[in-house]
Image (cartoon, rainbow, N blue to C red):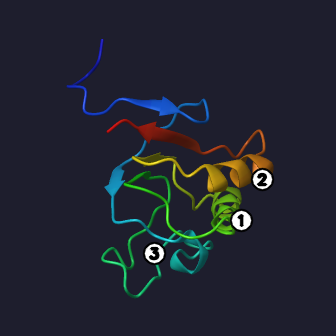
Amino acid sequence: MASGPEIARGHALAVGAASGRVLAIEPVSLWGGVAAESGAIIDVHHPALGTSIAQAVLVMTHGRGSSSASAILAETLRLGTGPAAILLRSPDTVSYTHLRAHETVLDLVCRLLLEK
């Protein structure tokens, strides 16, 4: 039985389980927008500047940036500074495909696609 009301429904792009604090933010480019060493948002134009994505359930409407962002995401996961999960309203299949290329047994981020 659920512990609370259902707030979203979606399709898993990577099967897994994750938990963490919810961090709902404007889309951020991981390449140049997040410091891999700390997980902090470093984009000076982003409203959540200084906020850490580490171990958070990162909720955004869509991804931002290019496929090179997946390298930063993979590095944050390796360092333990990455998000526990990423929930997106719109699919980001380019980053997802590259992330799967960087995936290891110990470092898997759970990405979901929220239905509109």
Q: Residues within 10 Å of mark 1 (few under 14, many from 20)?
A: some
The kind of secondary structure element at disc 3 is loop
**Between discs 3 and 1, the one toward the N terminus:** 3
The quarter of the picture where the N terminus appears is top left
User: Residue at position x 77%, y 53% from top?
Assistant: 102
Residue 71, labelled with which disc?
1
Farthest-out residue, top:
1
Residue 24: percent from left, percent from top: 32, 56
Q: Residues within 10 Å of mark 2 (few under 14, many from 20)?
A: some
For residue 57, above or below residue 62: above
For residue 110, above or below residue 60: above
- Gap between marks 3 and 1 measured at Cα: 16 Å
Mark 1–mark 2 contact, CB under 8 Å?
yes
User: Residue at position x 70%, y 64% from top?
Assistant: 75
- Gap between marks 3 and 2 measured at Cα: 22 Å
Residue 30: percent from left, percent from top: 56, 70
Q: Label 3 belongs to which residue?
A: 41
The kind of secondary structure element at disc 2 is helix
Q: Label 2 belongs to which residue?
A: 102
In the drawing, does residue 6 fall left or right of residue 40?
Answer: left
Mark 3–mark 1 contact, CB under 8 Å?
no
